[in-house]
Image (cartoon, rainbow, N blue to C red):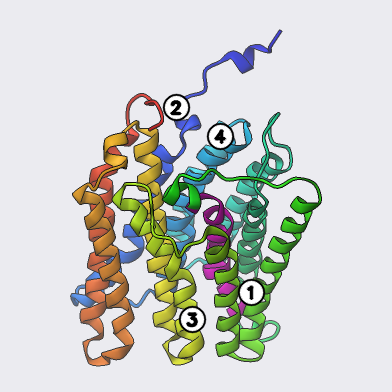
Amino acid sequence: MEPVSSLRPVPVWRREPYRLLFPLGVVLGQVGVVHWLLYALGLASTWRSTSHALTLVQGFMLCFALGFLYTFIPRRTGTEGPSAVQLGVSLALPVAVTASAWWEAWWLTEACFLAQLGVLLSFVVPRILSPGPGRTVPEGMLWVPLSLAMGAAGAVLTAIPPGVGPRWLHPLGTGLLLQGMFAGLVLGVGGMLLPMFLHGEGPGAAEGARRRVKQALHVAAALCFVASFFVELLASSRWGHGLRALVVAVALVGPTRLWRPPSQAGLHRWFIWASGWLLPSGYAVVALRPELRTAGLHVVFLGCFALMALAVSVHVVLAHGGQGRLLMGNPWQVGAVGALMLVAVVARVLVPFAAERFTLWLGIAAAAFLGATAVWAAFLVPFTRGRPAPHA
């Protein structure tokens, strides 16, 4: 006989955690960007570049990653979703990270972030190592725990006070934290899901020796990716970013055959496809023109990480909400979100080219991001409420 606890219905918010985490991510993203708009308009004089970066990565992006992983991994592995404690902690800690970053309590910021990564690792690792009966996990999912480990290492190194240890430790931590973790998640999860989202091709998993070889290749690629940060800091920025672009291209563009445009209907798929290309493109820009490092990295941050998070979440919310017509269609709201995000990318890239109009382009980028997330919320939040619908 099954234990009574296993017969109790699981609440919707635990079966579909994205319902809570995606909207929270949008709110934190707006908190992390709104001060840039106020600064551009002359309504604020404080320069909060560090809290801006940490809020967007450890608040906005983290909530989207949590919402996706907590929803997707149980379905893929045939295992239970997050516990009430895990999900409750994951709703509180990104808010704590954002608040402490705003008050520049850096140690507290990274302590909260490390606690969140610990909770996420305790959820992810057992399900990847021991999926349910008859379930297999694609080899690329190894990138998920490896990426979280990059984020944890980056958080620890970032929290080291200036003057302690070699000078390159802090920028190494910043690179692993702000770039490494989410680039790794794109390579692992995106490498598996892009063929499904763009072409309806289900993820497969090899067996036996072939599986072990593929796993070894993924680990080798991850080590090369981490090594690129050391190359950047200890040898050459050009070669470090060039190696990063190469690893990303080999690990993402090749296996997903990203050169094929989307064959499935749905406007959001074109934005997912574009965001995949912008990851290696951003790194290639820095490799070719190291003086444009900030511009190239914003192509990565806004063009890949943020655009992919918003576009993939469109798929998740509409599919789980049973909105097949919208999922396969071209809603104007999806077009507005994608177009505004691309405006934000272009405006932020133009900043170093027009120093005399710095605040203008910064203000346009901030306003476009805020507009994109506002349209996202108005369109999708209503579908995160109510009873679960048949998967579209």
Q: Residue furthest top?
A: 1
Residue 31, relative to residue 281: is it above or below? Answer: above
Q: Which span is picked out in magenta?
A: 171-194
The residue carrying pointer 1 sits among few (fewer than 14), some (14 to 19) or many (20 or more) residues within 10 Å by Cα, namely some
Residue type at tag 1: Ile
Which mark's residue is nearer the viewer, 2 or 1?
A: 2
Q: Are marks 3 and 4 in contact (CB under 8 Å)?
A: no
Q: Position of residue 130 (x, y in %)?
A: 73, 37
On screen, residue 253 versus residue 235, left or right, reads left
Q: Is residue 101 visible?
A: no
Residue type at tag 3: Ala
Total number of numbered labels? 4
On screen, residue 17 versus residue 1, left or right, reads left
Q: Position of residue 105 (x, y in %)?
A: 50, 66
User: Separation of disc 3 and disc 1 at Cα?
Assistant: 30 Å
Residue type at tag 2: Val
Dominant secondary structure (helix, strand or loop) of the stretch shown in magenta: helix
According to the image, label 3 marks what residue?
A: 284
**Mark closer to the chain start, 3 or 1:** 1
Quadrant assignment for the N terminus: top right
Q: Are marks 4 and 1 in contact (CB under 8 Å)?
A: no
